[in-house]
Amino acid sequence: MQPGALAPGRVPNPTHAPMRRNPPKSGRLSVVKSPPLVGRSVLPLRLLATLSVLLSLVWSTPSLPQFETRSDTTAQAHPFVVAAGDFNGDGKLDFADATNSLQIFLGNGDGTFQAPTDYLSNSGVLFVVAADLNGDKKLDLIVSNLSGLYVLMGNGDGTFQNPVSYSVPCTPALLAVGDFNGDKKPDLLVTYRACSFFSIYLGNGDGTFQQPGINTTPPFGAPSGTGIGDFNGDGVLDVAVGQQFGGISEVQIFLGNGDGTFSTGTAYNVGSEPESVTVSSFRGNGTQDLAVATLSGQTDILLGNGEGTFQSGRPLKALNAVWVLNSDFNGDGLPDLAIASQGSVVKPAGVYVAFGNGDGTFQPPNFFAAGNIGLVSLAAGDFNGDFRNDLIIPNYGPGDIIVLLNTGAAKFAPTIPIAFAPQLIGTASAPQTVTLTNTGKSSLSISRMSVRPPFQASNTCGSSVAPGATCDINVVFQPNAIGNLSGLLNISDSASSKPQVIELSGAGTAVAFSPSSLTFPPQKVGTQSTQTVKLANHGRSALSITLIYTGGTDYRYFAQTNNCPSSLAAGANCTISVTFTPQKAGTFTAVLGVEDNGGGSPQTIPISGSAD
């Protein structure tokens, strides 16, 4: 260990129940982006300091991008932030997810991912950033959690060495990597949950960092967001800090001195609750500009003057913005913005994408709904290898990771994966339709569509779709086995250099209802009527039934009795009697449900009735 390095400590192995983190009230931790490292190449340390995931991949013909949910990967509860990179050197983007544990998902190269491997299990991971800390061209990870700060050195095969802990003054929150003292070794910027300062830990170039950290205290305490760049052209990294104090909402500039310390620069007013800062040259002149996402409903643009000061640009309307990054999404070589909105009771969560004009202004944002209320972050990268930048969103509430693929001129509707209701084994579902629209200015060539059983597909697209025209893709689910089943519809077209995929899912079941719904005719309030349903086991083994129930909105007006045993033999059936007893006038709806081991449980059928 080099002199001055932080002393590594033992990684805690908690035996107590996982600590639950409170959901962020306003996404105050959703600010710093993991530095992008694509493939096995190592980006210059100057680029490592960029807090947005900027992948300047340009394809031959710019086109209007469409972002559509093409995979939904299960993670632990409350995924918070992801760091994208090629962790195993196969040329496919992977990602690390900060949730209750640190989860590593290896990419399949089509926007889907393998099952995760966990590190720092149940330790309350708060943030993760990826960078090559020791120059071996393998990505390493720096992680903050409820206990402190950890470094995991990458093995280059998708696995990581045991976490090494580092002592810090407060619980770390946000992390970023950059060369703050000009020695071409990665240093670390850390903000904290409770401390009123941010720290620079100087790197030794071998994955260790010097101690103590060099602290800088903003005027109003702990930053709510940070952005890094060379704002005055002196070759030294500077820092922009978002702050909220009472009615004061500002971005404070700190100019680097080249040794990990900073001189205080000018502060600039922005919208209330600044949450995230991204840095790029929005005018293509090499001068660093800022975009600042705020909860006030706007994302502010600050255009750099080249000597450490800024002037106000034209803001963008983006409601409940908690995260902003820049990347080239439409292939014109100009930085665009992606802004995460945490949503509200009247506005869904999702992403605003604003295309840059190259002069410091942006076109009005397009909104793509994704995720749930409480969305706190996003990242960008080419997750399917088609040379178009996609988006990945940790969906904080449900605990899943959503990939929005950039489908170029091919627009699909619906924009979400196709999910089928439980389907009786050996039978075919009704088709679900995906409509493809060519939003480009030239014909869209389609060379191939393919899907594997238990899914089948037909289409009206032919080999070419004219500009502005649409066609339909019809998908049918025909399971031959019980349980959850999944697949992919692959579409090879001229909008992408790689097949575009639509995720498919369904469940095969041995349980059949006859009839498949119940509708009670109108009756008087206070009277009673009964209808019956036959439940049949079409499986090859006994069906274990654990619960039969009525549920749904108006379940109190419906009751059930049955003669079903707890174990229903293969090929056997039983009868469920449903009674409707309305206590007031109106139309009422509910469901009859069965919980069992027959696949797709609980299976349900709709029931309804009316009274006067």
Image (cartoon, grey):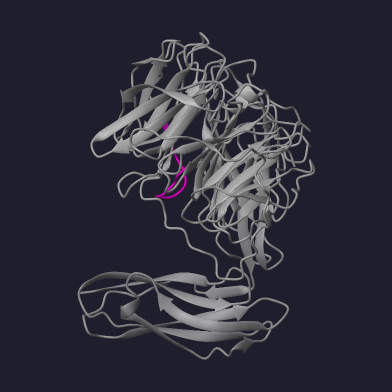
Measured from the top left, where is residue 166 in percent x and y?
62, 48
Q: Is residue 600 left or right of residue 280?
A: right
* Picture quarter with the C terminus: bottom left
Residue 315 in the magenta stretch? The answer is no
Instruction: Judge whether 96 appears above or below 48 on screen.
Output: below
Q: Is residue 587 left or right of residue 11?
A: left
- Between 363 and 533, the one nearer to me in the picture: 363
Instruction: Judge whether 261 appears above or below 360 on screen.
Output: below
* Res 154 quadrant in image: top right
Q: Residue at x 65, y 64 (%)?
A: 13
Q: Examine the residues drawn in magenta and state their main secondary structure.
A: loop
Asked if one can make out residue 435 in the rendered structure from this viewpoint, the answer is no
* Res 412 quadrant in image: top right
- Between 291 and 189, the one nearer to me in the picture: 189
Asked if one can make out residue 174 in the rendered structure from this viewpoint, the answer is yes
Instruction: Judge whether 76 appears above or below 495 on screen.
Output: below
- Between 272 and 184, the one nearer to me in the picture: 184
Q: Give the farthest residue toward the top.
A: 285
Q: How many marks?
A: 0
* Picture quarter with the N terminus: top right
Q: Which residues are magenta?
A: 365-377
Q: Residue at x 79, y 40 (%)?
A: 156
Q: Give the farthest residue toward the front.
A: 3
